[in-house]
């Protein structure tokens, strides 16, 4: 099995959510805990990149032996600064990368992506691309140093990649606003109810 690391971006300001997103609860666990646990079995190491209010997630992630919390002092410069900070700590042959506000990505998505043998794999639900992405670590130097890239999307769009169709809408569901949070909580509750009935 190829050694794969995970990178979780959790440094943002949460300005549109009227709350610090990473500590919002879904199913009795915070967003950051859900995100970590969904990828946990498919990663040798998980790098959580913190910035704004990093102390609030430090106490949550310390219980996970695979997690390394790193501080992006430049978090005000935007998400790409956190991408590059996280990638500087990757040692695996490949890495998953996802923002920390995607709490409903199922473990099966990580499994499906890991089974591909391509350089870049992106999950898709009903034709719409989502998170996480899986990328070979040999590209890290290019991602971090090419002045033509202002985002990870710039890099991905400059390369060929493989789309992996999945049946999990969770790859599209992030939390930007209070309305997003309420909607995702409702989806989580209804999904659990269906599982309990079956």
Image (cartoon, rainbow, N blue to C red):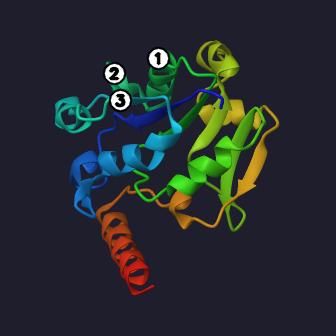
Quick check: 188 above or below 87? below
Local SS, label 3: strand
For this view, does 48 lie left or right of residue 23?
right
State the CA–CA distance, disc 1 to disc 2: 9 Å
Secondary structure under the numbered disc 1 in the rendered image: loop
At horizontal 38% and vertical 68% (from top left) the residue drawn is 184
Marks 3/1: CA–CA distance: 11 Å
Is disc 2 placed on a helix, strand or loop?
Answer: strand
Query: Is residue 31 left or right of 106 when viewed as pictured?
Result: left
1 and 2 marks in contact (CB < 8 Å): yes
Quarter placement of the C terminus: bottom left
Q: Which residue is mark 3?
A: 67
Question: Which tag, 1 or 2, sits closer to the chain's start?
Answer: 2
Given residues 162 and 16, the one toward you in this image is 162
Q: Report which residue position mark 2 lands on.
A: 70
Which residue is depicted at the point 17% across and 30% down? 55
The structure residue drawn at horizontal position 23% and vertical position 36%, both measured from the top left corner, is 57
Q: CA distance from mark 2 to mark 3?
A: 10 Å
Counting residues from the start of the chain, the first of labels 3 and 1 encountered is 3
Q: Residue 61, percent across and down?
A: 26, 35
């Amino acid at each position: 099995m190829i050694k794969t690391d995970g990178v979780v971006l959790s440094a943002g300001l949460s300005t549109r959510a009227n709350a610090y997103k990473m500590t919002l609860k879904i199913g009795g666990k915070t967003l950051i805990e859900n995100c970590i646990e969904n990828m946990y079995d498919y990663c040798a190491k998980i790098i959580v990149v913190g910035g704004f209010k990093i102390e609030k997630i430090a106490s949550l992630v310390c219980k996970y032996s695979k997690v390394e919390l790193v501080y992006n002092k430049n978090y005000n410069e935007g998400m790409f600064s956190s991408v590059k900070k996280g990638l500087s700590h990757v040692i695996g042959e490949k890495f998953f990368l996802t923002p920390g506000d995607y709490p409903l990505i199922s473990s099966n998505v990580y499994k499906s992506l890991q089974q591909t043998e391509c350089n870049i794999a992106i999950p898709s639900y009903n034709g719409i691309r989502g998170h996480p992405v899986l990328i070979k670590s040999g590209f890290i130097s290019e991602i971090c140093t090419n002045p033509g890239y202002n985002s990870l999307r710039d890099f991905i769009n400059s390369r060929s990649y493989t789309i992996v169709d999945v049946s999990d809408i969770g790859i599209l569901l992030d939390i930007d606003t209070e309305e997003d949070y309420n909607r995702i909580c409702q989806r989580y509750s209804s999904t659990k109810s269906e599982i309990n009935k079956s």
